[in-house]
Amino acid sequence: MLACHVRNCTKDNFPLAFADVELVVKPAEENLDFLRRFLPKLDWRALVDTARSLGDTALPDDMPATWTDEQLQALHHVLLEIHVEEGKMICRGCGHVYPIQNGIPNMLLAEHEISR
Amino acid sequence: MSRPEELAPPEIFYGDTEARKYTGKWVSIWFFCIMAFEVHGGPQSQQLSALSYPSCLLPATSPISHLSPSRAPADIRSTRVQNIQAQMTDRALELLQLPPGESAFLLDIGCGSGLSGEILDEDGHVWVGVDISPSMLEVALEREVEGDLMLHDIGQGFGFRPGTFDGCISISVLQWLMNADTSTNSPPQRLTRFFTTLHSALKNPSRAVFQFYPNSDDQVQLITQCAQRAGFGGGLVVDYPNSRKARKMYLCLMVGQQEVPKGLDGEEMTSSDKAKKREQIQNERRRRRDSGRDGKKGKKKSSKDLTGKEWVLKKKDLYRTRGKEGVPLDSKYTARKRRVKF
């Protein structure tokens, strides 16, 4: 859900690519109704690509028109249970690196990168 | 100094020592200090000077020791401050008016150690927290809060995709945006950036509720002005306006819930409209022609060409757009000559 917000970075700034990741799976309570409402906000292509780059291949290529509970569970696993504990997020457009430490991405920008 | 904003920028004020006070050992002292701030109505409070009292530097065991020994540290954490924080979060949630019974995707701005986030959890919402202080986020990690955390300066704007969040709450944060800590950041600019990016990150329709302690009416005006410019509707909600202690300000902003003026109906413009439009266009052309005739085209008046009064007005305008306080009003007496009178 996060795009690069560096100044003048308007092309190719979504999704941010992960690198050097350390994954942790934390079980979370399932809330399939919430997920159903969340679906229209997702950029499916970006989500599947990101999930694949993190080594999770449970999601289908195209967004299913009707959702079975299993598919929703797979989505739940990808969205809410996989946490990136350490690593980097890299913007494909400008190459800005956002480091992730202890599961907290550092989105701070330097003075010259702040958009007007 | 009565306000923490005046002491240091947030990432430094909520540094390691301050944040450690939120964890078990140091917790009670911090809460006493915060209590003084929250309970005594924030801005007017002089109680924070208690911070400098040497007793505050004692380890937490001393304030704890006079309590009954049966009280566990967890008990001590749930002091009145937490209740006040909880009350404010509850009130903010109430103002958000989310559809009942549904879990929403919320943004918690200035989540700190996740006090407000826990309340969102209790109501079954999924949330993302942003904060500028790494130390506070560390505490949040130790407390194992549910939401995703992010280290982010809200004055730099968000990178969230449009329409991501169903709502946004923030407790006691906005006043931090009013400081110019470095020479390069100006509060109006940071506020504008914050509000515009937030506006796009919220879905339509949705609400954002900010609880904050403004320093003066000018600050309130500046904040609401910036929010309106960013496209938000809504306004201030003041709880208990007559009480000095319990008075709380909530800025309740709305995305797309107001009635917007409708566009003109029908396919064609009516003939009178057309005529008016044509006239406008003609006048526009003449205006351009006239302005092009005198002097060089498209060149701004240099400061040397300005008269004294024009120069003063220009400067005052500049200061106002920069958000400087106390710029005198314009009048017919502005920049008049003071002749010697005999």
Image (cartoon, helix red, strand yellow):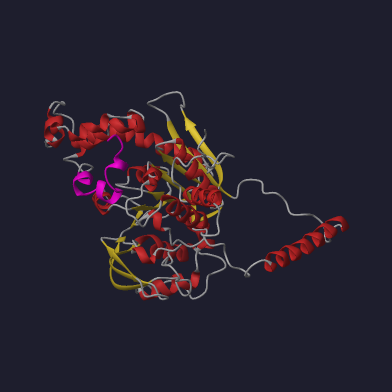
Residue B11 falls within the magenta-colored stretch? yes
Q: Where is residue B294 in the image (x, y as percent from the top left)?
A: 67, 66
Residue A56 falls within the magenta-colored stretch? no
Q: Work out whether residue B14 can be spotted.
A: no
Question: Nearest the camera: B322 or B221?
Answer: B322
- Name, please, the residue furthest toward the front: B342
Q: How many marks can you see?
A: 0
Identified at 29% across, 40% down, the residue is B4
Quarter residue B27 falls in: top left
Q: Work out whether residue B27 can be spotted.
A: yes
Q: Position of residue B78 (x, y in %)?
A: 27, 34
Vertical position of residue A21 compared to residue B307: above or below = below
Quarter residue B212 falls in: top left
Vertical position of residue B199 compared to residue B123: above or below = below
Q: Position of residue B224 (x, y in %)?
A: 51, 44
Vertical position of residue B55 compared to residue B316: above or below = above
Identified at 31% across, 50% down, the residue is B145
Question: Nearest the camera: B65 or B255?
Answer: B255
- Name, please, the residue furthest toward the right: B271
Report the magenta residues as a range: B1-20
| Main SS class of the magenta portion in the image | helix
Question: Nearest the camera: B122 or A65?
Answer: B122
Question: Nearest the camera: B280 or A17?
Answer: B280
- Give the position of the N terminus of chain A as an image quadrant: bottom left
Q: Is residue B66 left or right of residue B140?
A: left
Q: Position of residue B306 (x, y in %)?
A: 55, 56
